[in-house]
Amino acid sequence: MARPAWAPLESIADEAELAAICRRLGAAITADHPHGLVAVGVLKGSVPFLADLVRQIRVPVEVDTVAVSPYDPGQGRTRVVKDLDLDVSGRPVVLVAGIVDTGLTSSFLLRHVREREPASVSLCGLVDKQHRRIVPIDVTYGGLPGPDRFVIGYGLDFAGRYRNVPGLWAADSRALAEDPDRYVSDLYGSPIDRRSAIIRSRHER
Ligand code: IMP
Ligand code: MG
């Protein structure tokens, strides 16, 4: 029998497991910040995680976001394209990232936040690919260890795809490089299924 050309999708965490991770991290952040905090989400990958996490924090939270341009190895730097809106000086900050891979983005953003002289700043990352680090940074509040594969879903994308998939999946990065839509039918059903689902929902109205 011919072997599949690409490694199949592998579930890393389903919705129930992601909810349990948010409860655990929310409890830890609550315990460490009795007077509240500013949660700063790294756009766009942290959006679903940020939304679920802050609702598991039982002290007052103000939410802010930052966005950076992708790290450019040619230029050797990252740029802030959406800065903090809040003045965080003297306040505890938790930076919330969907994934920490080489650590270049998060370490750059931690430095950027520290320049605003917060009372403290720590890092919360849903997926922590520790083995991939170039910059040795600590994820104080870590969700789960990253596999040695490309991760999609629950905010994490490949070329803008898959962010709204409810669970986290390990994908084959070579398959994605060849066809970014490779996993669309696996994760959303075939176009025919999608069309009949739309027709069904119209009839059900
Ligand atoms: P860094 O290497 O820690 O700077 O991570 C840079 C960015 O690369 C992350 O914020 C993600 O946007 C993206 N990234 C790295 N690994 C993955 C992955 O496995 N899935 C989706 N995005 C990733
Ligand atoms: Mg991305």
Image (cartoon, rainbow, N blue to C red):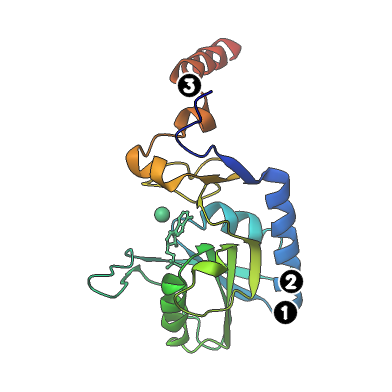
Q: Give the residue at the far front of this rendering.
A: 1
The kind of secondary structure element at disc 2 is helix
Residue to which mark 1 is pinned? 32
Please tell me which residue is depicted at 55% across the width and 89% down the height of the picture: 90
Secondary element at tag 1: helix
Write the residue at 42% across / 87% down: 115
Q: Residues within 10 Å of mark 1 (few under 14, many from 20)?
A: few
Q: Quadrant of the C terminus?
A: top right
> Camera-side residue: 96 or 180?
180
Q: Choose mark 1 or mark 3, whichever is in front.
A: 3
64 horizontally vs 73: left or right = right
Label 2 is placed on what type of residue?
Ala
Do tag 1 and tag 3 residues touch (Cβ < 8 Å)? Answer: no
Residue placed farthest to the top in the image? Answer: 203
Q: Residues within 10 Å of mark 2 (few under 14, many from 20)?
A: some
Residue sitting nearer the eye, 36 or 122 = 122
Residue position for label 3: 190
Image coords of residue 41 (percent x, y): 51, 64
Q: Mark 2 sits on what residue?
A: 28
Mark 2 and mark 3 lie on one chain; the one further toward the N terminus is 2
For the residues labelled 2 and 3, say whether their Cβ atoms are less than 8 Å apart: no
Q: In this picture, is 31 found above or below 66? A: below
Residue 40 in view of the camera: no
Residue drawn at point x = 47 percent, y = 44 percent: 172
Residue 71 versus residue 121 in the image, above or below? above
* Disc on the earlier residue, 1 or 3: 1
Tell me which residue sits at (38%, 71%) in the image.
83
Tell me the CA gap for discs 2 and 3: 41 Å
The amino acid on which the numbered mark 1 sits, given as a three-letter code, is Asp
* Image marks 2 and 1: residues in contact by CB distance under 8 Å: yes
Residue 113 at x, y percent in the picture: 46, 81
| Numbered label attached to residue 100 | none
